[in-house]
Image (tube, rainbow, N blue to C red):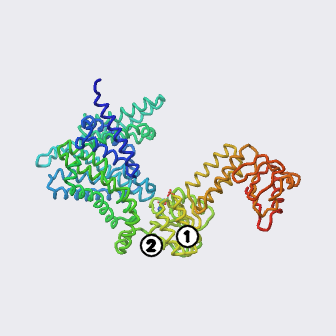
Amino acid sequence: MHEVPLLINITLALIVAFLGGVLARRIGLPTIVGYLLAGIAIGPFTPGFVGDLDTIQQLAELGVIFLMFGVGLHFSFQDLWNVRDIAIPGALIQTAFATLLGFGLSQYWGWTPLAGLVIGLAISVASTVVLLRGLMDNSLLNTSHGQAAVGWLVMEDILSVLILILMPTFASNSGSFDWANLATTLLKSAAFIAIMFIGGTRLLPWLLEKIAHTRSRELFILAILAITLGTAMSASELFGISLALGAFVAGAIISQSHLSHQVGADLFSFRETFSVLFFVSVGMLVNPAFLWENIGHVISLSALVVLGKTIIVILMGFFFPRPARTFLVIAVGLSQVGEFSFILGQSGLSLNLLETDQYSLVLAAALISITVNPFMYKLLPWMETQLRRIPGFWKKLDANTHILEIKKDELVNHAVIVGYGRVGKHMVDVLETLSVPMLVIEADAERIASLNERGVPTLYGDASNSEVMTHANLDRARVLVVTVPDETSAQLIVTAAKDINPELPIIARATSEEGIDRLTQLGAQDVIHPELEGGLEIVRHALLKLDFPVSEIIRYMDAVRHDRYNTQINTQEEHRLLHDLIHASSGIEVTWLSLDANNSLVGRSIQDANLRALTGASVVAIMRKGQLIANPKSYVIFEAEDRVGFIGDQEQIEAAEQFLAKSTSDEAGVEWET
Ligand code: AMP
C-alpha cells in the first residue's frame, strides 16, 4: 500500500483538532484553545505522532487567506465611522502603547530591536474571532459599548494590514533604514489596492452576478474560490505583497456586492476547515519544554497582554467623552491576542526577524489570554464595583459622561424610558402619538441625535450610572420603563430608581429567567422577557394554523406566562393546559370547567345533574387526575377537582356557566377558564 502523506496529515490534524475543540467547549473555553493544544499534541516537540509541519503549513496558508478574506468581507467603514470619535484615536494610542510595552519587555530580555518590534506589534492587535464571540456570549454586541469595541477592532484591522505591508521593509534593511524599499512597498501596495478598487469593484461583483444567474451553486462557489485565491496569489506573485493582504482586499471588494452574504455563507465551511488547520499549524510550532524553561517570560508577556492592555484602555477613559463602562468593555474585549498576532508573527518568522522560540512566546501569550478572556467578562461587574470604591478615580473616569441640561420644570408626570433600541423605540412611538410627556435616556450619541430631531427630550449617558439617573426627575415621574438588554445594567438602573423614588412603578426588560426573579426582587412591578414573548407569539400563530381553538391557546399562553414570570410556582398548570389543548383539537371547541370540593355538583351523577336539559350544553369529557374520561356515561359521578368539558353554542355555554355558578357555594367552586 503506498502512503498518502498529505491525506494522513490532514486527517490526523482534523481529528485531533476536533477532539481538542470538543474538550475546550466542554470546559467552557473557546474552541481555538483546543485547536492550538491539538497542534502542540501533534507537533515535533511532544511525543507520539508528529505531523509534517511543511504539509500542514501549506494548507494553513489557505486558512490565512480565508480568514483574511472573511475579515475583509465583514470589514465595515460604517461600523468604524459610527464610533470614529473613540475608535480611531483609541486604537492608534492603544496599539502604540502596547507595542512600546512589548518592545520594552523584549529589550529587557536582550532581544534584537527588530524582534522586539515584531513582538510588540503582534501583541498589540486583538483577535476579531475572540472579540465577537466574547461580546455575543455576554449579550454586549448590540450595546453601545459593544459597538465601540467593534469599531475599535476595525481600526486595529486596518493597522494590522498596514503592518503586514510594512513588515518586509523592516526585514530588508541592514543597519540603516531602507527608505527606497519602504517607498517601493507602499507604491506596490497602493497600486494593487487602486487597481482592485477601481477595476475589481466593477468586475468582481458583475462576474458574481452573472454566475448567480446561471443558478449553479457549484459554479458560484467555484467563482468565489477562484476570486479569493486568484486575488491573493496575484497580490503575492505580481506585486510582491502578502497573500493575507490580497485576500483582505478581495473580501473588502466583495463586501460591497449585494451577494456578499451568500458569499460569506458559501465560504463558511472552507474558512472554518482551513482556519482550524491554521491554528493547528500554529500550535505545532510551540515547544512546551522551552515555554516551561522560560515560564517567567511566558507569564510576563501574558500579563502584558491581559493586564497591560486592559489598564491602557481603562486609563484612556479619562480622555474621551464616553461612559466608563464603555472603556471597561473595550478593555476586557481586547485583552487578548489571536489570529492577527499569529499572522504577524509568522510573517516575522519567514522574514527572519523572529526566531521560532520567540514566536512560541507569542503563541503562549495568545493561548493564555484567549483562555482567560471569558473569565475577564465575568470580572466586569467586580472591576466596576472596585473602581467605584475609589470615588475620585471613578468620577474622573466617568466624568465625561455628557449630561444634557433639561429644563427640570417641564419634566412632570412623565414616563422615563431607558434605551431607544429595538424595544424602546415602540414605547417612544406610542407615547409620542398619545402626547404623553417622556424623557429618553440613551447611551448612544447617534440615537440621541435622531431623538432630538424628533423633538423628544433626552438624557445622554449610561443609565446604570446612578449620577445620570438623578437627572431624570424620577421623583416626579409616573413610570420608568427599562428596555436595556444588559441585565446587570437593568439591575443597577432599577436599584438607583428605587432609591430616588420608592413608589415609582417600574417596567423592566429581562434577558434570562433568573433575571426575571432578580429584577422583581429589586422592585420592578412588571418584568418582560422579550424572547419568551416572541416564542409564545410563534407558538400562538403555529397552533392557530394547526386549527387549535383560540380560547384554549390563550389559556395555555396565560398559564405559561404565569408560570415563567412567577418562577416560585411549578409548571403543572402549564402541562395540564397543554394536555387539554391536545384533546381539544378535534375541530369542536370544548370549554373546560373546574369543580372544586365546594361545588354542589360534586357527588352527583351526570344524569342527576340534568345539565343538558337545563342549559342545552353537553358534557363530552371529564379530566380526572390526569386521565381523560371521554364521552362519560350518565351514571358517572362528579368528583372534586374534576375538569368538565362542555360543547354547545355560545348561548348554551353561557347558560351552563350561569347554572354552575349558582350551584357553587360561597367560596366559588366553579371557575370558567375561557
Ligand atoms: P435594543 O436591544 O435594540 O432594544 O437596544 C437597547 C438600547 O439601549 C440601545 O440603543 C443602547 O444604546 C441602549 N442602552 C443599553 N445600555 C444602556 C445604558 N446602560 N444606558 C442607556 N442606554 C443604554
The CA distance from mark 1 to mark 2 is 20 Å
Please state which of residues 604 and 593 is positioned toward the viewer in this rendering.
Answer: 604
Provide residue 281's location: percent of width, then percent of height. 28, 41
Provide residue 227's location: percent of width, then percent of height. 36, 34
From the image, tell me which residue sits under label 1. Answer: 523
SS state under label 2: helix
From the image, tell me which residue sits under label 2. Answer: 467
The crowding category of the residue bearing disc 1, from other C-alpha atoms within 10 Å (few below 14, some 14 to 19, many at least 20), is many
The crowding category of the residue bearing disc 2, from other C-alpha atoms within 10 Å (few below 14, some 14 to 19, many at least 20), is some
Please state which of residues 551 and 432 is positioned toward the viewer in this rendering.
Answer: 551
SS state under label 1: loop
Q: Quadrant of residue 572?
A: bottom right
Res 208 seen here:
yes
For residue 74, the mark is none
Please state which of residues 386 and 333 is positioned toward the viewer in this rendering.
Answer: 386
- Number of callouts in the render? 2
At label 1, the amino acid type is Gly
